[in-house]
Image: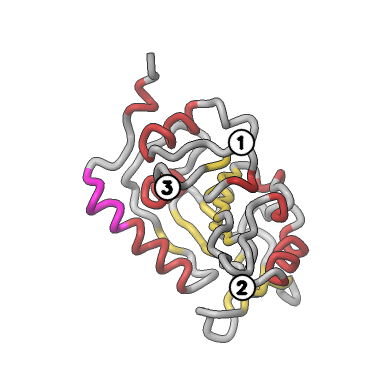
Amino acid sequence: MIAPEILTGGFSEPVFQSQAVFRQVLDAFARPGRVVAMPSVVTAPSPLFTPTAAFLCTFADEATPVHFEAGLAGGAAAAWVTFHTGAPLAERPDLAQFAIVTDPLALPDLETFALGTQEYPDRSTTIVIQVESLFGGDRFRLEGPGIDGAAEASPAPTPRNFLPALARNRMLFPRGVDLVLAAPDAILALPRSTRVTALRGA
């Protein structure tokens, strides 16, 4: 018997709610570093934040494998995503279209995920990293497409090996992964084209 928490909590108005989430995610990627509030339109089992679950309900489907950390792959959160999106679970991160990291301090090497190819750079993983807050952590300077001059980000806690990992990822461009930092009520996008450095004086 499927637990009630898996059967409930998805979009109640799929068309309108998915469009609202899509617009917010598009805004986040168009303006890297911008903190974008996410509508509270779904309720997923712990440890998934509402923005993470809404992102998956909008973008994941039967053709987009989702990878979860080992401790979550057999749990209620993964079952909820599979039930509400139809997305299969990817046992290996390099086979995933989307990956969920709920412990930023245990972020795997980005090179273990799908990085795309020169011909098909879109065949890469988008990684959603959950953080407690998008403010108050180590301060970073962001530069690149979609940013007027420079922007600032300060996720807390800072994902493991964040700066060197992002530097290596950017060097792969147009290959590489895209990141979404998800707090309990908002997101911040870091496309592979964004240059992230330590903010002087931080």
Give, as a single range, the part of the protein colored magenta: 13-20
Separation (CA) of disc 1 from disc 2: 29 Å
Which amino acid lies under the numbered mark 2 shown in the image of this protein? Answer: Thr
Among numbered discs 2 and 3, the one appearing first in the sequence: 3
Task: Return the mark for residue 193.
Answer: none
Circles 2 and 3 in contact, beta carbons < 8 Å: no
Among numbered discs 1 and 3, the one appearing first in the sequence: 3
Q: Residue at x 38, y 40 (%)?
A: 85
Choose between 8 and 67: the one closer to the eye. Answer: 67
Which amino acid lies under the numbered mark 1 shown in the image of this protein? Answer: Glu
Task: Return the mark for residue 194.
Answer: 2
Which residue ends up furthest to the bottom in the rendered image? 149
Separation (CA) of disc 1 from disc 3: 16 Å
Separation (CA) of disc 2 from disc 3: 24 Å
Q: Residues within 10 Å of mark 1 (few under 14, many from 20)?
A: some
Question: Judging from the image, what secondary structure is the residue with disc 2 in?
Answer: loop
Q: Quadrant of residue 156?
A: bottom right
Question: Judging from the image, what secondary structure is the residue with disc 3 in?
Answer: loop
Question: Judging from the image, what secondary structure is the residue with disc 1 in?
Answer: loop
State the quadrant of the C terminus.
bottom right
Which amino acid lies under the numbered mark 3 shown in the image of this protein? Answer: Ala
Choose between 139 and 179: the one closer to the eye. Answer: 179
Task: Return the mark for residue 60.
Answer: 3
Residue 71 part of the magenta-drawn span? no
Q: Position of residue 62 (x, y in %)?
A: 41, 42
Residue at mark 1? 91
Q: Position of residue 137 (x, y in %)?
A: 65, 59
Q: Position of residue 117 (x, y in %)?
A: 63, 64
State the quadrant of the N terminus.
top left
Q: Is residue 53 above or below residue 148?
A: above
* Mark whose residue sits in front, 1 or 2: 1
In the rendered structure, the answer to whether residue 80 lies left or right of residue 200 reads left
